[in-house]
Amino acid sequence: MATPVVMPQMGESIAEGTIVRWIKKIGDEVERDEPLFEITTDKVDAEIPSPAAGVLTEIKVKEGETVAVNTVVGTIGQVGEAEQPAPVSAPPPPSPTPRAAGPAQSSPQAAASPDDLRRQKSSPLVRRIAREKHVDIHQIAGSGIGGRVTKKDILAFLERPQGPGPTPRPEAVVGADLPPSHEASADRRSLGEGGQVRPERESRGEIQPLSPIRKKIAEHMILSRRTSAHVHSVFHVDFSHVERIRRDKKQEYERLGARLTYMGFIGKAVIDGLRRHPIVNASIDGDNVVYRKDVNLGIAVALETGLIVPVIRNADEKNLLGLSRAIVDVAERARAKQLRPDEVHGGTFTITNPGHFGAQFGMPIINQPQVAILGVGTIEKRPIVVDDAIAIRTMGYLTLGFDHRLIDGAVADEFMADVKAQIEHFDINQV
């Protein structure tokens, strides 16, 4: 008996997903719960397991296509069943066009309120952007499933000049391998020996479309730059004391199943700082400030295809051992595409580590709707002045990116001074 394979709903607010890669091909045998295809959504990248054992007999949705949740994307059949070609998918039905006003007609259903219509045709993120930018969602033509307004739609709407005016001509694609016109060909010719016309060599290059995850990252970064007033503050921190603790406690923590890394100490210092400065753990919702009671710590993880930020929930309830375990766990599962949807949203503060690749420090972009992010530079031995003498210490730069709409420079620096002091005088007996 054939088993349909559907696009799963990877989170409450997720309405669609994009198939990045089919791990199995038509005719391949597959076991139940064996990875079948890979998807990306607004929240998470994941490998989707097969719902049954058998043979992949049909692929209905190709790689790179985006479909609504619960859409049938393929079929698992029994061994020996014939392969079926994938039918051409029909275009989505057009969104309903408002009818002109006329005589009132009776209807068995009550008319939906404007708020209900917005919820049907946009995600919570889109509604928040519209609220902050004072945009009526009904003015935007949705390109999503059933006329749903997507992040791409509202960002494109905000980019357009408001008011009447000529439509700007699209820019030519620089470096595209397009057939040149006769006029353009003449412009690219040059004189050779004897005054003969000689065409110049075409520039060599390659054009590839953005991957789905890069599109999501691009949208999120542009939105953050447009939303927050970014300011950065850089502190030079002495990790020599932490390095001695790591050396002394390394084997003890390994026996307990944890790797004692710098990130664990930094995370613990950040959590203690957020308790003393709750505004750094807050967010902005329109004209309101939302103060978070819990610390949900995001840890940015670099993947081959981009960046993802898994979240350690209730990180403030963990000691150094528990936090170290959690950081390693979410990082490993992020690289293995095994994160759950609820593990990539709801963060209140994010730490990113460009220093892992040798950067002295970076100027990170805030992870919306948060109001601050910490960047960790490379940690290494450096000569510094201690008591009017040159000494060698294990040093690193920490950079706080913060939203100046809510956080003043003095508050940001007080927070960073607390984090610096906690690291430089870390008390292992109090964790």
Image: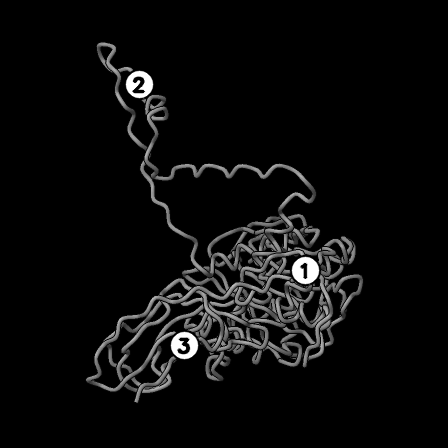
Q: Is residue 225 left or right of residue 287?
A: left
For the question of whether residue 262 can be seen, the reply is no
Coordinates of residue 299 in the picture (x, y in percent) = 56, 67
Quarter of the rendering containing residue 420: bottom right
Q: Secondary structure at mark 3?
A: strand
Q: Residue 34: x and y, percent? A: 34, 81
Q: Disc 2 marks which residue?
A: 190
- Quarter holding the N terminus? bottom left
Identify residue type, mark 1: Ala
Q: CA distance from mark 1 to mark 2?
A: 61 Å
Q: How was this image coloured?
A: one colour
Q: Residue 147, position in %: x, y?
A: 57, 64
Tell me what residue is drawn at x 58 percent, y 75 percent: 312
Q: Residues within 10 Å of mark 1 (few under 14, many from 20)?
A: few
Foreground tag (3 vs 1)? 1
Alpha carbon separation for disc pair 3 and 2? 57 Å
Within 10 angstroms of label 3, few (less than 14), some, or many (20 or more) residues? Answer: some
Residue 109 left/right relative to 358? right
Disc 3 + disc 2, Cβ < 8 Å: no
Q: Residue at x 68, y 77 (%)?
A: 107
| Foreground disc of the pair 3, 2 | 3
Which of the labelled discs sits on residue 72, or is there none? Answer: 3
The mark lying in front, picked from 1 and 2, is 1
Helix, strand or loop at label 2? It is: strand
Residue 353 visible from this viewpoint: yes
Of 298 and 177, the residue lying toward us: 177
**The quadrant where residue 165 appears:** top right
User: In which quadrant is the C terminus drawn?
Assistant: bottom right
Question: What residue lies at 42% left-to-right and 37% top-to-bottom?
Answer: 174
Q: Residue under label 1, please give it.
A: 100
Query: Mark 3 is on which residue type?
Result: Val
Q: Are marks 1 and 2 in contact (CB under 8 Å)?
A: no
